[in-house]
Image (tube, coloured by chain):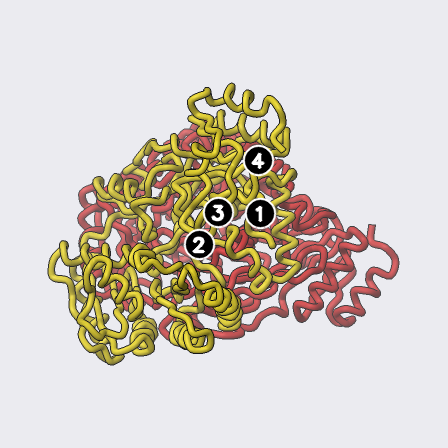
Chain colours: A red, B yellow
Amino acid sequence: MIPAHFETDLRRIVGDEYVRVGEHDVEPYAADALGIGHLPDLVVIPANTSEVAAIARLCHAHTVPLVVRGAGTGYTGGAVPTQGGVVLSMERFTRILEIDETNLLVVLEPNVITGQLQRAVEAVGLFYPPDPASLERSSIGGNVAECAGGPRAFKYGTTKRYVLALEAVLPTGEVIHTGSKAVKNVVGYDLTQLLVGSEGTLAIITKITLRLIPKPPAQATLSASFADVRAASDAVSELIRRRVVPAAIELIDADSLQAVAAHVGPMTAPGTGALVIVECDGTPAAVDEEAVRVHDACTAAGALSVSRATSEAEREALWAARRELSLALRATGLLKINHDVVVPRGRIPELFDVVAALKAEYRLRIASFGHAGDGNIHVNLMVDRGNDEERERARRAERVLFERVVALGGSITGEHGIGFAKRPYLDLELTPETIALMRRVKAAFDPAGILNPGKIFP
Amino acid sequence: MIPAHFETDLRRIVGDEYVRVGEHDVEPYAADALGIGHLPDLVVIPANTSEVAAIARLCHAHTVPLVVRGAGTGYTGGAVPTQGGVVLSMERFTRILEIDETNLLVVLEPNVITGQLQRAVEAVGLFYPPDPASLERSSIGGNVAECAGGPRAFKYGTTKRYVLALEAVLPTGEVIHTGSKAVKNVVGYDLTQLLVGSEGTLAIITKITLRLIPKPPAQATLSASFADVRAASDAVSELIRRRVVPAAIELIDADSLQAVAAHVGPMTAPGTGALVIVECDGTPAAVDEEAVRVHDACTAAGALSVSRATSEAEREALWAARRELSLALRATGLLKINHDVVVPRGRIPELFDVVAALKAEYRLRIASFGHAGDGNIHVNLMVDRGNDEERERARRAERVLFERVVALGGSITGEHGIGFAKRPYLDLELTPETIALMRRVKAAFDPAGILNPGKIFP
């Protein structure tokens, strides 16, 4: 598949030092948080946009598959090859180019780690809200490619709300610039938003301009314990019914609490059936006012206890434990099949009913937690690695989960994308007409179909 | 161009009553706020999505131009034919189908007037923030097609931030559904955001699902007078420097103040050089706190006076006057050539320098006002209708304005779109590669190029 001289041509573009061949050297580039994909034939590590463009032109000329990789923390195989070809690693694109305090924006290269970006802008009183749990490991380029969310999306929206402009290389080698540094721009089609969440299938993002907001001066974190997940999800609905809009409303079920207790220590009193964590932010007065409303709503919904973190250290410990949930579930040794389904926000109680039914019908351990305020829950099917029969039950349960979520007016993925993992389920949610249209859009960017083949489409 | 039997076929789809022919009957469908375009051969007024699909199939089969029209209030000719063909008027799509208080969303047909939508959701404590000045005349479908903004976009973003899902008919006749009722959705490409702002060139929107937020319980409106527009724009920068984020920061220059004084009565003391209007919203405590910060920032920037509206009636009067600005400028009898340029928000003082320079260089009357907090200013070249030489100067100034805005890192349109009016300037902002890509995206939706031909592209 890889023509003769291709490797030589690649070496000419980036230098010998930045081409990897051989199983040992390319294997680290074949996996993400989902697992191992196909090994690439070659890994190339360009230094700048013009090298990226030259690589794209070369791959296009020879119809060689080209998969772009950031930090490799995705959950659906978006950065992992499904066949041979080239992995283009963005690992040298690590600079924050400009923090513009007057225009409230930041310009940066895609492989800046999201947490690093946040600290850099917070140092000057600005704020980049999206906060995926992986923020200390995932890159902003990956966040843009997948449209990452996180707890604060409840108030602040996901990554897409902050992307103002992109520099990107088309799979045919042209460099395009979308959007501008202005916060409003309706010139032609919104290619910026089309690229956000396109999972590395339309173009190679080489520079990102993000809108920032002023950092909220005060925060409060409350946690409320409930007897069971149904009571906790009723509390989430009660908050929404009362028109309370905190920064984040998270829910953690008993199975997840148990895993985190074993991994980093207990978050709750023993026997708690579910935990709701609420983050308030804003001016000190507004935060205090909102914290009281949150307290009242949780109490009215039957919370066993509600408490507000009394120090910054206590706040941070709570959120750190929340961010460790995925790792804690992995630490159980079980295979964690992670789905990030989403329903209209008021239907969270019904979603938990679906999960309870699946547990019973398919005799599965399922640990659920996530962004309840957005209706977006990480439903983790926990399976014995050696138990093929259980795995098969999980596979059947997975499809039923997706069917029921779509029937609730929801979506099969709210954050992680389709990638390789959810391809078989795309047509549960999209009609053939819509899928055909998306394929034509893909062809408008990538006529030869070389960029990230085997993703999204069934 | 229109084949025989075409009219009969149209009549068969919608009934005789809903087809208009003849100059007198089609002429009302040939104009928008920009002016009169080409007369259509036929106007068709479908009742539902399947009639829209049948009309699209018919036009596609015969390669007849098809222009979709909402309330016809656009500023760039987006709803106006540039050649003959069919105008499809959405005037019968006027129902609010569902206000969902549990899931915080509304489902509606495109020709609901935006102000009517706002009142309907505010009656149950919810809030649809986008507030174009035309909100009592423009339709939500037009707002979505153009991605309308308005003063509150400063805090709340433009129309695109609220569109969750669309039903739309492709120019080839297929009905597609994009997005879902869930607030997060990363399934495939974001066709929803691609359709928002696509100016009726990609698909015919037939149903809209909008995200709502709780209505802020309190508001305050402040107005600050300045000696000149430079001082006023410095105050806007000072607000941003102090990280104050009110709901809206509007700026009105002396020429605009004069026009509104003649039209609806004075907004300011005589001799005021520029007015800044700031809207704060949120909880009562947060509003009071923010109003003090706004007052301090305006005073520090040299305001002649700062006052807070003391009653709801006074607040509403101020905003009503603001919304009348466009009509007031028209009432001067001069031709108003309206441009909605946008620059990175901190560069507002430089934008007003550009306007001042154009006034001097081209000896033009220019009235400017708008969404200063977003860097988005309506720059109105005011020209004697009978004076061709002045009109020619205005035409030359227009190009220079756009060039300088792009040089400031801005965009030639922040709200109104390209339509017919700004086509000649598209390549000032976009490269040939980007324009070519947009044309391929257009072809992915509309292979025969029948939908709204003559728009956006040069």
| Amino acid residing under circle 1 | Gly
Q: Position of residue A89 (x, y in %)?
A: 66, 62
Decide: is A436 above or below B335: above
Classify mark 1: residues with Cα within 10 Å, few (<14), some (14-19) or many (20+): some
Q: N-terminal of the two: label 2 or label 1? A: 2
Pointer 4 and pointer 1 on the same chain:
yes
Mark 4, residue position = B171
Residue at the limit of the structure toward the front, as seen here: B386
Q: Residue at x 26, y 41 (%)?
A: B121
Question: Tag 2's secondary structure?
Answer: loop
Please state which of the two labelled residues, at mark 2 or mark 4, is closer to the viewer: 2
How far apart marks 4 and 1 lie (CA) works out to: 15 Å
Residue A343, given in percent of the width and then of the height, sits at 40, 38
- For residue B78, the mark is 3
User: How far apart in space, not on screen, are marks 3 and 2 (Cα)?
Assistant: 9 Å
Q: Which callout, 3 or 4, points to the residue nearer the camera? A: 3
Give the residue number, with chain letter if any, for mark 1. Answer: B454
- At label 4, the amino acid type is Pro
Q: Spatial distance from mark 2 to mark 4, Cα to Cα?
A: 23 Å
Image mark count: 4
Sequence-first disc among 3 and 4: 3
Q: Chain of mark 3?
A: B
Q: CA distance from mark 3 to mark 4?
A: 16 Å
* Callout 2: chain: B
Q: Output the chain of dot 1.
A: B
Neighbourhood count class around disc 4 (C-alpha, 10 Å): few under 14, some 14–19, many 20 upward: many
Residue B416, numbered label: 2
Q: Nearer the viewer, mark 4 or mark 1?
A: 1
For marks 2 and 1, give the one nearer the viewer. 1
Quadrant of the image for the C terminus of chain B? bottom right
Q: Amino acid at mark 3?
A: Gly
Label 3 secondary element = loop
